[in-house]
Each structure stands twice: as structure tokens, then as C-alpha cells.
Amino acid sequence: MRSYIRTIRDLVGSRRIFVPGVRALTPNRSGEILLQHCTDTSLWGLPSGAVEPDESALEALKREVMEETSVTVMRVEPMGLYSGPTQEFVYPNGDKVQCFAIAFIVREWEGCPQADGIESSEVRFFQLGQLPRDLVRIHNQTLDDYARYKGTFLVS
């Protein structure tokens, strides 16, 4: 199935588009967060992606996490909404996006995290105080907010 974003790209080229998306904060029992090394940017980031037509945000989250990390999402808690100019991102090929993303904490999951070899070349758990330097810029605030999260939905 051809993705909605690819269809839009055929129409508008690399110009900035608004992308409704999801981000997964998936901690292990030690409190470390699962990150993936993205093949398109060569950066580390949260499992994330666009919501497709006829798909809910939760369905998109489950699909993206499974595709990118082989993890099955069982239970989530919505943590925050990220939007505005701080969420602009330019891919190495020049495609520009401005994300409107809901971040979810994955409270329960099953499986053994592993990279799919297509969207991610590696997946690994990191301590919040020892995140990689080569991190997707628009995920920094999400990770900072997670470190300080007190159970109240955040909007930025």
C-alpha cells in the first residue's frame, strides 16, 4: 500500500507539509528508553511515524512501533502533544515537514526489540541521562518532558 505522505510528496515535492504523527516512549524495567537508529537520517530517535488515512493515532502508534522495533504495544498513556515551528524537520533528501504529534508512553509491551533493517538499522535502550548526541532534534523536547512527566497531559 502506498503511504499517504508519499502520495502528497508526488503532488508538492519537497515543500513543507504538515504531518499528523505519533511518538512512542517505551521504557524497559530499568527505566531506559527504547530508541532506534533511523536509516533515512542516520540519527537516533523515538519510534514514530505518520498517521495514515482511516487510522487512529493509537492504531498508528501500534503499527509504527511494530514495524520499526518488532515490539507489540499492549497499553499506553498519552503524554503530550507537540506542534508548531519547533517541530519543523528537514530530511536529508530535502523533504520538509512540520509535525503535529502525540507522544505516548508505552506502559506495557511484549516482544524482543529488534531493528527492521528498513526504517531502523539498530534499536537499543538508553538511560535518560546518557542519550546519544546524534538524536533527532524534534524528539529532544519529548524526551525532556518524559523525564519530568508527572501524569498531566502536556501541550506545546
Image (tube, rainbow, N blue to C red):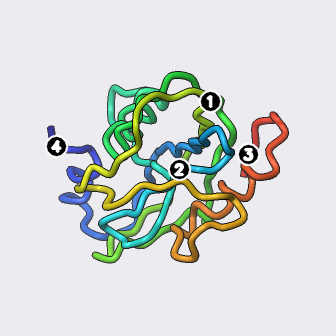
Give the mark nearest the N terminus, 1 or 3. Answer: 1
In percent of width and height, residue 80 lies at: 68, 42
| Alpha carbon separation for disc pair 1 and 3 | 20 Å
Give the mark nearest the N terminus, 4 or 3. Answer: 4
| Alpha carbon separation for disc pair 3 and 2 | 23 Å
| Alpha carbon separation for disc pair 4 and 1 | 31 Å
Residue 127 — which label?
A: none
- The amino acid type found where label 3 is placed reads Val
Residue bearing the label numbered 3: 155
| Alpha carbon separation for disc pair 2 and 4 | 28 Å
- The amino acid type found where label 1 is placed reads Arg
Say which quarter of the image contains residue 59: top left
- Residue at screen point 47% across, 65% down: 44
Question: In the orientation shown, which residue stands out farthest toward the left?
Answer: 1
- Residue at screen point 24% across, 56% down: 117
Q: Secondary structure at mark 1?
A: strand
In percent of width and height, residue 143 lies at: 67, 56
Residue 2 — which label?
A: 4
The mark lying in front, picked from 1 and 3, is 1
- The amino acid type found where label 2 is placed reads Leu
- Residue at screen point 33% across, 26% down: 54
Q: Secondary structure at mark 2?
A: strand
Disc 4 and disc 1 in contact, CB within 8 angstroms = no
- The amino acid type found where label 4 is placed reads Arg
Residue bearing the label numbered 2: 34
Give the mark nearest the N terminus, 2 or 1. Answer: 2
The mark lying in front, picked from 2 and 4, is 2
Position of 74 relative to 136 (above/below): above
Q: Is residue 6 left or right of residue 55?
A: left
Are there few (<14), some (14-19), or many (20+) residues within 10 Å of tag 4? few
Residue bearing the label numbered 1: 107
